[in-house]
Image (cartoon, coloured by chain):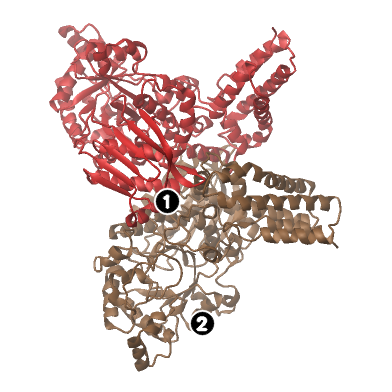
Chain colours: A brown, B red
Amino acid sequence: MPLPAHIAPGEGQFLLDGSFGVVLEGYTDSRLLRAKQRFLDRLARETGIPLQSAAQASQPSFIIVTAGASDPVQQLGEDESYHLKITSSHVQLMAANPLGVLHGLQTFLQMVRITPQGFSVPAVAIDDQPRFPWRGLMIDAGRHFMPVPVIERNLDGMEAVKLNVFHWHLSEDQGFRVESKQFPLLQEKGSGGQYYTQKQIGEVIEYARDRGIRVVPEFDMPCHTSSWLAGYPQLASGSGPYQPQTRWGIFDPAMDPTRESTYQFIDKFLGEMTALFPDAYFHIGGDECNGKEWDANPRIQAYMKAHGFPNNAALQSYFTGRVQKLVASHHKIMEGWDEVLQPDTPRDVVIQSWRGPEALAAAARKGNRALLSAGYYIDLNQSAAQHYLADPLAGDGAVLTAEQKVRVLGGEATMWSEFVTPENIDSRIWPRTAAIAERLWSPQETRDVGSMYQRLAIVSRKLESCGLEHQTSTNFMLRRMSGEDDPQALRVLAAVVQPPEGYAREELKEYFTSTPLNRLVDAVPPESETARHFSDLAKLIAAAQASPQQLQEARNWLVLWRDNDAKLRPTLEGSEITGELIPVSRGLSQVAMIGLQALDDLQLHRRLDAATFQKNLQLLEAAAKPEAVLLNKIAPSVQLFVQAAGPQ
Amino acid sequence: MPLPAHIAPGEGQFLLDGSFGVVLEGYTDSRLLRAKQRFLDRLARETGIPLQSAAQASQPSFIIVTAGASDPVQQLGEDESYHLKITSSHVQLMAANPLGVLHGLQTFLQMVRITPQGFSVPAVAIDDQPRFPWRGLMIDAGRHFMPVPVIERNLDGMEAVKLNVFHWHLSEDQGFRVESKQFPLLQEKGSGGQYYTQKQIGEVIEYARDRGIRVVPEFDMPCHTSSWLAGYPQLASGSGPYQPQTRWGIFDPAMDPTRESTYQFIDKFLGEMTALFPDAYFHIGGDECNGKEWDANPRIQAYMKAHGFPNNAALQSYFTGRVQKLVASHHKIMEGWDEVLQPDTPRDVVIQSWRGPEALAAAARKGNRALLSAGYYIDLNQSAAQHYLADPLAGDGAVLTAEQKVRVLGGEATMWSEFVTPENIDSRIWPRTAAIAERLWSPQETRDVGSMYQRLAIVSRKLESCGLEHQTSTNFMLRRMSGEDDPQALRVLAAVVQPPEGYAREELKEYFTSTPLNRLVDAVPPESETARHFSDLAKLIAAAQASPQQLQEARNWLVLWRDNDAKLRPTLEGSEITGELIPVSRGLSQVAMIGLQALDDLQLHRRLDAATFQKNLQLLEAAAKPEAVLLNKIAPSVQLFVQAAGPQ
């Protein structure tokens, strides 16, 4: 995962043992040498066989042939293809440049599995290249700061699924996260001490480059800038003073687009930051201006009148145009969110579409290149399937001309960080982002959701051995909130609840940047595997297509859930954090009882009377509503039973 | 854990929330500031409450008062005491110097737990100081190299249980692990590329100092030196050529004690290494010389005759004496294993006793200071209880005079690394070393094994949140060997088997340094919690003192084990690594069947006939023998049932 473009199965399998060795032929450089070492380290970890020392002594059976170098700074659209041939005795990996080698090594690693003969990889011939050249993951380090180790382990995860752009969202209303030597008050007043030094930035860029990943920085302007204005209120449209925001939402502070000093600041700032980030693209944000500070400032209103700007969008468009020229003067290509696309936006500006496929298609039609993020908002707790089926060239994208389609560069998963910390961010990004990675790499017709979920489960485990913590963090947090070493009953509950989708969470409670994110809603994955599996069972049962084994399995689950509340109750009462789960646990038990009753009815061909039917449906509806910011994901499946057993 | 010297419980509890803050009063330095930050980070991790940012804004409720500085280089015997007073509203930690502060912070962290009111610490007043001044953990980085992150996370674990000496075993027959600039062939020919740079050594020493831990290096000589001789064969007593050893055991290569050039080399080497390691003590090993190279070298034999050395021990004693003078000339105090103690050994040489309490007491009587490692060999897969009850001042130590007793400095757990890798070393060190730490810190009369095990389980979990991997590594390895995401049946088996104690493993199979250590024996902890618990049950049942609930629990366990083989079989057959477990799993099932039968007999007051009794005992005896280098730890408990139900 992502599934390669072309696979031809071979005969037999290639066995891995202590004699395994790798040799580099053709072009080599230090990045390839490091990649080889990391590959051996990963293989050693995946097998428990100490390959490093053995590799020096023995006959190498894995040959890597690289035709030539890749660009000194990785470019959009560079050749990423590779050819991987595995026989029972040898492996050959060929690529035009190191980028293809990196991808091919990951493909090999994903195929390693234990067999009765030992660790092995099936014989196969693979010809592979990506469908889109821009396959990204954005991490918002502005709202919750994410230390370098968090970024690095996620870069490892990106490499594993062949993503090639790390979009680093570095400034927000809540925090400015990069050391500026030109404007040190940015980090001093805007970060609460939580920022990346320029040295760290350089190390992350090197780390990413080693993994075939470009780093595109984003400094969001003119809005989402409260943290800048804390140190430099002279940039603001209002009168200040300003502080980094301590809540979530859209805020009024905005840069003043009408003063030349604003552009002088930005020019100097861009000079420093474009030197720090070598990538050809530079993201200036540009989203979500509410314009209130502009409306309230008579000087700005006068300026707009004098220059004939009919509204705030026109004012922002003027700002964007000025900034774009500054970005270009520093030899970078500007990127921005949907809002920066205006009638006079230069053609080379890349549009990142958060609003939807229509906006993406509109940009492509207008002649701009664009990438899709709508559909890939992994902070919204949607299913892997939903993300998987969002295609940059579906819907409005499907009717673009061939020339326009080429302007659709790919997409980016976006990890906004209102509700993630260094502790649980992995569980929000992974494994679902692997499904997005497949969408962006594999042929468009690769769309089998069942196959995706099967492979996703395997990839999820492999991602943990890359150092990601999306599975272990859940366990750790359950132990912490319960105070128990092995909180089995809490795990049973945790396995069937989910955070609500979309933006529901903020509406359920007010949050501060310092609010602890240590509750069950923060610990559980965004998508319940157990509930998905039970839902599949429920559909079969409701359609009277289930086997006796499947009926029994459903019954076993329901009994487990029915009886769990009594076991869990003492735990829940023992901890201030889990106290809010008492009704959630009771609700699960009640839902399970209704489900068992409905199963009985179905199996005995009894029909519910209308009154009980209605009562049960109401109970299930109530149980499906958020409680402790969690959804009971079994209730909708039980609803299927009740409806199937309902009055005719 | 370790249990403090004096505890006076108070009223109520101190609640931890986002307003928590820490202030340093009295003496401060950068180490204390870092300790405070690490304390806040740990607390944030233990609670999920973001303390760092909140702490800046609020009223500090935790006051640390430090009277003065500690020595620039931590000295043996420095004051480590602290006074910790916790009320429902405030915490005060007082100490003579930063060492006591470090210990007091760890005591506080261990007491944090979740309650219905939130995370809290019980009100208490603690006066605490260590029983022994030398409380160590030795890690053998020679046989299997242990990268810096492994060392650092174990230093975190040491800090958590107040150990204060990291004994770094840096050279072995299998590898020389330190960069020498004077003699670069040591690492170039002796390490296979796996060694610590001097920069890394310095960083580890700093890391340890920040945690109140001294770093004592060991360079074992004149034997265990094959890896030195690979680069410098002129030091050898034989004719070479030499290579680092690739198997385990005791080898012939030894330095030549008869040539002046040997001492010139050692002098220069000591000059470099004593400058690198600031601690006042320097360990020169000195153990396990088989003398074969000396016997075989006529020149050495002639020298011995000429100088009147009656045997190899005398020759080694001469060598040790020369080296001791060199060590002293570099202003260090020499430490060595038992063997270096000879009639003319200077009084200031510290003896590390691996042979037993007699050797320890002999050293103390002779006037040398000494520490105990016999009884603390954590590579030997003994129980925490065994280590816990080994006391430096028991047995021969108990009859020492008061003056002699003062010479007993403490002890060290020794992690020899034949059978550990960076992956599973934590599971061999932890949590058992916490029991040793308590022995060395807490009053001698603290000896309640039941209380120790209860507290050990809690500490074990806390150690994981320090970053140790003793629990997660087992899970990871079980998943890897089975290829399953959730290998439940394998976990059932894994929970009741143990590696054999002592040196049995090497006798069961020949190992190379490159032999994969990825089998079940490498994955399971040295001590089975489940088997220990079942054994307690079995003793009650055999003594006819079990409650009906306990009888039912025993029965449930036996049913689980009886039925597990059928579930586990397909997994075992699917993997080359687990194939060897087929008889182990079958054996568990058979033992459980015998146990269930015996339980029935006991409950129905049936008596076994003599023939069945004998047959069952034989089956159990066979089942208790190592299979796949694993012991079935249920068999001995079932034996108790069978014997209780046996013929009268």
Q: Of helix, strand and loop, which one carries label 1? A: loop
Q: Amino acid at mark 1?
A: Asp
Quarter the C terminus of chain A occupies: bottom right
Quarter the N terminus of chain A occupies: bottom right
In the image shown, does A504 or A281 lie closer to the viewer? A504
Q: Measured along the vertical axis of the image, is residue A155 above or below residue B536?
A: below
Mark 1 surroundings: few (<14), some (14-19) or many (≥20) residues within 10 A: some
Give me the chain letter of mark 2: A
**Residue B175 position by quadrant:** top left
In the image shown, does B640 or B379 lie closer to the viewer? B640
Q: Residue B17: which disc?
A: 1
Q: Amino acid at mark 2?
A: Arg
Q: Residue A136: which disc?
A: none
Residue B18 in percent (x, y) is at 41, 53
Mark 2 surroundings: few (<14), some (14-19) or many (≥20) residues within 10 A: some
Q: Of helix, strand and loop, which one carries label 2? A: helix
Task: Using the numbered discs, state the Cα–Cα distance from disc 1 to disc 2 in whole angstroms.
Answer: 54 Å
Residue at 65% across, 13% down: B643
Residue B228 in percent (x, y) is at 26, 28
Residue A310 in percent (x, y) is at 42, 91
> In the displayed structure, does residue A449 sit left or right of residue A104?
right
Residue B130 in percent (x, y) is at 31, 27
> In the displayed structure, does residue A326 sit left or right of residue A497?
left
Residue annotated with mark 2: A365
Q: Measured along the vertical axis of the image, is residue B603 above or below residue A298?
A: above
> In the displayed structure, does residue A44 sit left or right of residue B591?
left
Give me the chain letter of mark 1: B
In this view, the mark in front (1 or 2):
1
**Residue A486 position by quadrant:** top right
In the image shown, does A202 or B559 lie closer to the viewer? B559
Task: Specify whether residue A280 is in view.
Answer: no
Residue at 22% across, 27% down: B281
